[in-house]
Image (tube, rainbow, N blue to C red):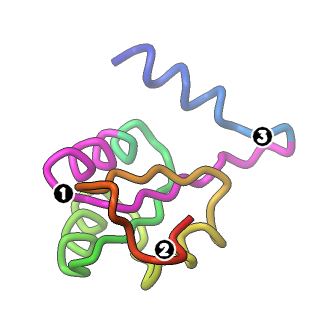
Amino acid sequence: MEDVYASVEASVRRDGVRERIGFIGLGGMGGPMALNLMKAGYEMVLHNRTRRKAEELAAEGGGEVADTPGEVAGRCEVVITMLPNPSVPPGLF
C-alpha cells in the first residue's frame, strides 16, 4: 500500500489542493476500487445507476454522491468509469 499513499501526495496540485476523483459504476469491481481510493485519502464523488450503492459506499469511505454522471464530471478533475458492458447511457461520454 505504500505506493498508493505515495501517489496520493502526487495528486496534490501546485496550488496545494488535492484533485477530486469521480467514480461512475460501483459494482463488483468499481465499488472496491473506489473504496480503496477513499481509504488512500482521495476525495471522491460517486455515481451508480442504483443510488443506494453509491450512498452506502460514500457512508463507508467518506465520499460524496452525485445524481448524474454529468455532475460527477463537473465536480472532478479525474473521472473513472467501471461499467458492466459497452452499451453505456447515451451522452455519458
Q: Give the camera-side residue of 37 and 80.
A: 80
In the image, residue 93 sits, relative to residue 32, either above or below, namely below
Taking the spot 62% from the left edge, 28% from the top edge, the residue there is 9
Three-letter residue code for mark 2:
Pro
Are the residues flagged by discs 2 and 1 in contact, CB closer than 8 Å? no
Report the side of 84 relative to 45 (left or right): left
Asked if the magenta segment contains residue 75, the reply would be no
How packed mark 3 is, by other alpha carbons closer than 10 Å (few <14, some 14-19, many 20 or more), is few
x then y, percent, for residue 65: 40, 75
Taking the spot 65% from the left edge, 48% from the top edge, the residue there is 19
- Alpha carbons under labels 3 and 1: distance apart: 30 Å
Residue to which mark 1 is pinned: 27
Element type at mark 2: helix
Q: Earlier in the sequence, mark 2 or mark 1?
A: 1
Q: Quadrant of residue 83?
A: bottom left
Element type at mark 1: loop
In the image, residue 41 sits, relative to residue 59, either above or below, namely above
x then y, percent, for residue 36: 30, 39
Residue to which mark 3 is pinned: 13
Q: Earlier in the sequence, mark 3 or mark 1?
A: 3
Labelled disc at residue 93: none
Picture quarter with the N terminus: top left
Q: Read off the magenta span.
A: 15-36
Three-letter residue code for mark 3:
Arg
Q: Quadrant of residue 70?
A: bottom right
x then y, percent, for residue 80: 47, 50
Residue to which mark 2 is pinned: 69
Residue furthest toward the bottom? 67
x then y, percent, for residue 11: 65, 35
Q: Quadrant of residue 2?
A: top left
